[in-house]
Amino acid sequence: MTRRTDRTPLHLNAFLMSVGHHEAAWRLPESPASGGTDLAHYAELARIAERGKLDSLFLADSPVLMGDPGRRPGSKLEPTVLLTALAAVTSRIGLIATASTSYNEPYNLARRFASVDHVSGGRAGWNIVTTAGADAARNFGLDDTPLHRDRYLRAAEFVEVATKLWDSWADDAVLADKELGVHARAERVRPIDHRGTYFRVDGPLNVQRSPQGYPLLVQAGSSEDGKDFAARYAEAVFTAQQTLEEAIAFSKDVKERAAGLGRDPGGIKILPGIVPVIGDTGAQARELDAELDRLIRPEYAKRQLARTLRIDPDALDLDAELPGEIPGEDEIEGAKSRYTLIVDLARRERLTVRQLIGRLGGGRGHRTFAGTAEQVADTIEHWYDAGAADGFNIMPAVLPSGLELFVDRVVPILQERGLFRTEYTGTTLREHYGLPRPANRIFDVVDSRAGHLGIALSGAR
Amino acid sequence: MTRRTDRTPLHLNAFLMSVGHHEAAWRLPESPASGGTDLAHYAELARIAERGKLDSLFLADSPVLMGDPGRRPGSKLEPTVLLTALAAVTSRIGLIATASTSYNEPYNLARRFASVDHVSGGRAGWNIVTTAGADAARNFGLDDTPLHRDRYLRAAEFVEVATKLWDSWADDAVLADKELGVHARAERVRPIDHRGTYFRVDGPLNVQRSPQGYPLLVQAGSSEDGKDFAARYAEAVFTAQQTLEEAIAFSKDVKERAAGLGRDPGGIKILPGIVPVIGDTGAQARELDAELDRLIRPEYAKRQLARTLRIDPDALDLDAELPGEIPGEDEIEGAKSRYTLIVDLARRERLTVRQLIGRLGGGRGHRTFAGTAEQVADTIEHWYDAGAADGFNIMPAVLPSGLELFVDRVVPILQERGLFRTEYTGTTLREHYGLPRPANRIFDVVDSRAGHLGIALSGAR
Ligand SMILES: Cc1cc2nc3c(=O)[nH]c(=O)nc-3n(C[C@H](O)[C@H](O)[C@H](O)COP(=O)(O)O)c2cc1C
Ligand SMILES: Cc1cc2nc3c(=O)[nH]c(=O)nc-3n(C[C@H](O)[C@H](O)[C@H](O)COP(=O)(O)O)c2cc1C
């Protein structure tokens, strides 16, 4: 195995998906009936992740009831609320929530994330998504999802406005001079007077600059526009990668795009997803995985797959391969990269619809890896050493047990190998990821190329 | 003193305004420098209020940096985030946050409040406001505040959409039948397909019905449109009332409007604000009050008053009465009732601008009462017995000390007199206020006149 010369400890993020990433996880005895709205359940997950010294936990989101409510738990707590509740029961782990740039206003969202960063002592992160799907659009007065390209244009302007708002208070703005009777120094709090294509926002924000300056900026779309957006704005990238080769190419691609914009490629952490199914033996792990797949109700899953592929469910035969006639990625206005990944996976491995449903049921396109704790640690080390990943997005099939097994069995092996921290050394999310606190571009940055968003902004104008 | 025959325990709400309601409170030694963003400070306030068995705590809000940042702390935590953080450090007290119907989307806000109700075990309340002011409008792409009337029309439709979303899951929707593989019963989760003037929202919500059904609906505008809105939708009303007579008339007015819509007038709790300044003697209390007024910097306050009155600051002479030429309420598109209250107060008591600033500095139009604990209890009992109030919005001039004095000295007197609970008897906010959990109008209500919103909705159509 060739060692990476830039060997820094790898990063681990716990992707908390109510009762687990496998769509049938809720049918297991351990799963609470209303896992998605059960704070005690999430609090337990957060404590387990923190016990494992993980960098962060992560909550996905879309402002819509996803899919058929009969199929799997659809009711969930809103992520910025849940993140705040989890801040209260943890003290060190980073806290990342997803929020949509298509269905929020920058002033409102910037306030909420700044507030979470304050109440958590600098542990907030924002997974910036553009939200695919007509069903979400129809909760916000639209008939269909805005065009993919427009969503990303709006996302770029949204991040620009949000970061300006976070920078609208200098770090030293609050004087609180009780003697003199001056609270904040007026010249250190400034309107942003943003006038753009999608937004007009005067500012300043009504929240002073937060411990991290602003939340860690995370991104999770892998289309061409998605990768450009990541290269420009993201400090961490979640991605679904099925093979080592593709993962290496993806990481190289995003980092090169970032370097092309003048950014340090080390300032952008690539975190592919892995669904670790852990057993005492490889055979036991594979049996656990198969057991879960048997709990999937194929009629629900077939309907869902047909929706993703934008074809008639009747065109899908459970015991045959995908039909030849399905749309190309360029016809998809939703989640482009996920779409292509599914089709490629089915074609490459010549999977039947039933087999494909099994593979997607586990990780919705992410790589499922069934094996012993040792084998899971090996594949993590292998991908890390090969430059396919700066860390991993851990997506247990079943929660809490899958996270517990990972923390109690895999993490100690990674620690022994010197690949993972044995104690938190920093207190903020950015410190865990080895990333700097961003300079304030309104008040402190003389050279506009100093921070990664110095570049982002001038590039976006 | 004539006793009210419907003698039910009165209700007390702690209005938590960072370091206190007096605009100069931040200059006192006890005030933390960044009180508005200091979670530990708010957690202390919440614990004190809960120790006093208060019904609820309350957070005001506007999505804008209010006034001059030099004048008083302007940086604050976003209220739904702060409410969630306070849910974690309390177990019984109700938790009410303000949110604007003018600058939010119903789907997003309904989710957040349903989520807070879940994580707090049924303790959430929503103070529904329409947000006055051009400065807030300019954070959301507008040049000026929408017209007063339009704001209230949008507010009514907003509440209609939100309550439909909260009712889009039947209470018994989640089956979680692991054996059968059916999570929620599809026929007990329904789209709302709202098509209105301001909103088009398909639904259903992606949060199952919460412990209280939905948050307590609170309202705080006292204009004619405001009172109509309260009569239709509110379960509790915050109001600023300077005199007993006006308070009695206000309460009677709102309850009659509610009765006119077929609602039980007892189902709407009127809570006037009081700024209690408590001393060992009346003289000591008045000196404390005067001391605070001396800490106001009149040049800031004069600028603020001129802005509220929409006149030139130079037209105000600190040692003279208000000029004769100021606009009438009908010319005001902002906060109508607050405007009229200020002008009436100044004219009635023939206050100089300096005196008016002092009176407003304490409670921004709310009644300041300086006296002993016994005297504060007396005035509360007096107003309550006279039918001017179902309870009070307690607005300490200085926090935490003002709240602590109220809880430790006034509450025991009210308890001794049998006017206030000595222990919580319920677990939800609605239970504290003696209000029923609302029926689900989509799934459970056969007679549309059953709940107060049955009427509200048919009336609004
Ligand atoms: C690990 C991971 C998590 C994601 N989480 C979300 C999410 O919570 N909400 C969402 O709308 N999209 C999520 N996505 C999808 C993308 O962010 C993106 O919105 C979508 O794929 C469209 O982008 P693309 O066309 O650039 O791939 C996630 C993707 C990955 C890889
Ligand atoms: C105790 C109290 C608290 C209030 N809190 C808020 C608030 O937090 N945010 C806000 O925009 N308005 C608040 N208001 C003002 C009103 O809700 C309303 O928005 C404004 O007065 C306009 O309504 P009106 O013209 O009907 O009076 C409050 C009023 C009172 C009496």
Image (cartoon, coloured by chain):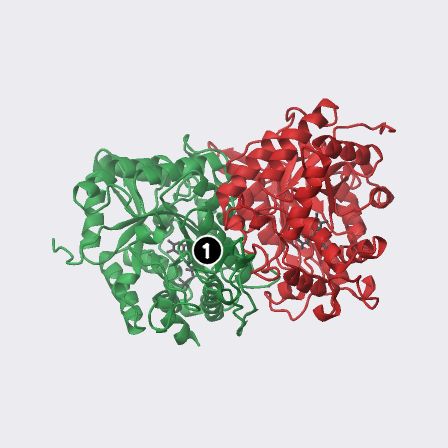
Chain colours: A red, B green
Identify the image quadrant of the C terminus of chain A: bottom right
Identify the image quadrant of the N terminus of chain A: top right
Observer able to see residue B77: yes
Count of numbered badges drawn on the protein: 1
Task: Characterize the local packing of mark 1: few (<14), some (14-19) or many (20 or more) Cα atoms within 10 angstroms.
Answer: some
In this rendering, is residue B43 above or below B302? Answer: above
Residue A269: where, in percent of width, then height? 76, 39
Observer able to see residue B104: no
Residue B68: where, in percent of width, then height? 52, 47
Residue B355 as seen in the image, left or right of residue B186:
left
Amino acid at the residue labelled 1: Ala
Q: Which residue is mark 1?
A: B306
Residue B326 as seen in the image, left or right of residue A345:
left
Looking at the rendering, which quadrant does residue B212 occupy?
bottom left
- Tell me what residue is drawn at x 55 percent, y 32 percent: A91
In this rendering, is residue B315 above or below A411? Answer: below
In this rendering, is residue A145 above or below A160? Answer: below
Please tell me which residue lies in front, B5 or A449. Answer: B5
Q: Chain of mark 1?
A: B
Looking at the rendering, which quadrant does residue A217 occupy?
top right
Residue A157 as seen in the image, left or right of residue B73:
right
Residue B338: where, in percent of width, then height? 38, 59
SS of the residue at dot 1?
A: helix
